[in-house]
Amino acid sequence: GQSLEQPSEVTAVEGAIVQINCTYQTSGFYGLSWYQQHDGGAPTFLSYNALDGLEETGRFSSFLSRSDSYGYLLLQELQMKDSASYFCAVREVDSSYKLIFGSGTRLLVRP
Amino acid sequence: EAGVTQFPSHSVIEKGQTVTLRCDPISGHDNLYWYRRVMGKEIKFLLHFVKESKQDESGMPNNRFLAERTGGTYSTLKVQPAELEDSGVYFCASSQDYADSYNEQFFGPGTRLTVL
């Protein structure tokens, strides 16, 4: 089975950079995804790492190291609207498309 | 293009009652998933439909939960009878049928279920 660990809460100031880590124990997976969820809203896809390395999408970047069982989401130039919960997720290597999620990190951006 | 929609957005019921949640996936998406987030914990998989067939229902907690997807379009998730521990946010997601390993899932806003 899979388990993904994330910090429960992170606080940062507007304009800063924040890194949200995700460590995992897995027997095999296709890649690491990141989702953002605002309170009361739908989880929204942010990024996906199939291979080791850094993927950049605007202010957001995501990193994966399979050898270290570790990934992170990097948010730059933080804005107040970035306050939300962030989830890492993996898809198991089997016939199912189900996502296994981490417990989520609540990011609070302060002025 | 409309996203995934769910109804109702909130439901408050008493223990022992029945509740039915509905999900309308993005048009053309063969894959439909149900997930649940309980008490601020991780989002947990419940089951996966491919069109009208249940592909994986390994996450269904017990036989009080029944999911259907007649005709391969919208899906319903019925909880009968509801228990206190069923409270949480139920998310539906859908995706297209990609042959490769990546399969982005589009989530609905969820139904917040409170069992009293």
Image (cartoon, coloured by chain):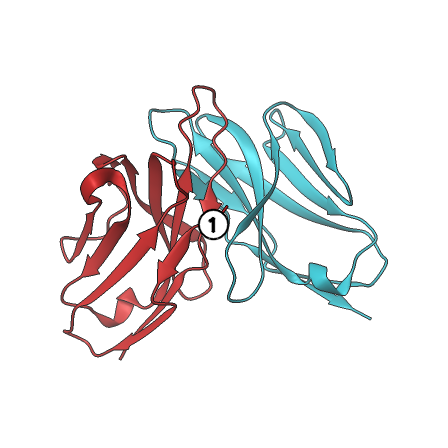
Q: Tell me where residue A76 appears, x and y as whole percent.
A: 81, 49
Q: Amino acid at mark 1?
A: Gly
Q: Chain A hue?
A: cyan
Mark 1 neighbour class, 10 Å CA radius: few under 14, some 14 to 19, many 20 or more: some
Say if A13 sits above or below A72 in the image: below
**Looking at this view, is A11 or A67 the one in front?**
A11
Of all residues shown, which one is farthest toward the top?
B99
Residue drawn at x 14%, y 64% as measured from the top left? B80
- Residue extending farthest to the right is A15
Name which quarter of the figure residue B15 lies in.
Answer: bottom left
Badge 1 is on which residue?
B3
Residue B67 lies, in percent from the top left, at 21, 49
Q: Is residue B116 above or below residue A26?
A: below
**Whole-percent x, y for residue A6 in the image:** 58, 50
Residue A72 relative to residue A29: left or right: right
For the residue pair A64 and B89, the one nearer the viewer reads as: B89
x 47%, y 50%: residue: B2
Chain coloured red in the rendered structure: B
Q: Residue, x 38% and y 32% (percent of image)?
A: A97
- Subunit of mark 1? B
Residue B40, visible in the rendered structure: yes
Question: Is residue B2 toward the left or the right of residue B66 in the image?
Answer: right
Q: Is residue B64 above or below residue B18?
A: above
| Residue B7 vs residue A107, the one in the foreground | B7
Q: Is residue B100 above or below residue B33?
A: above
Q: Is residue B90 visible?
A: no
Is disc 1 placed on a helix, strand or loop?
Answer: loop
- Of all residues, the one furthest to the front in this rendering is B1
- Picture quarter containing residue B51? top left
Q: Quadrant of residue A34?
A: top right
Image quarter (top left, top right, bottom left or bottom right) of the C terminus of chain B: bottom left
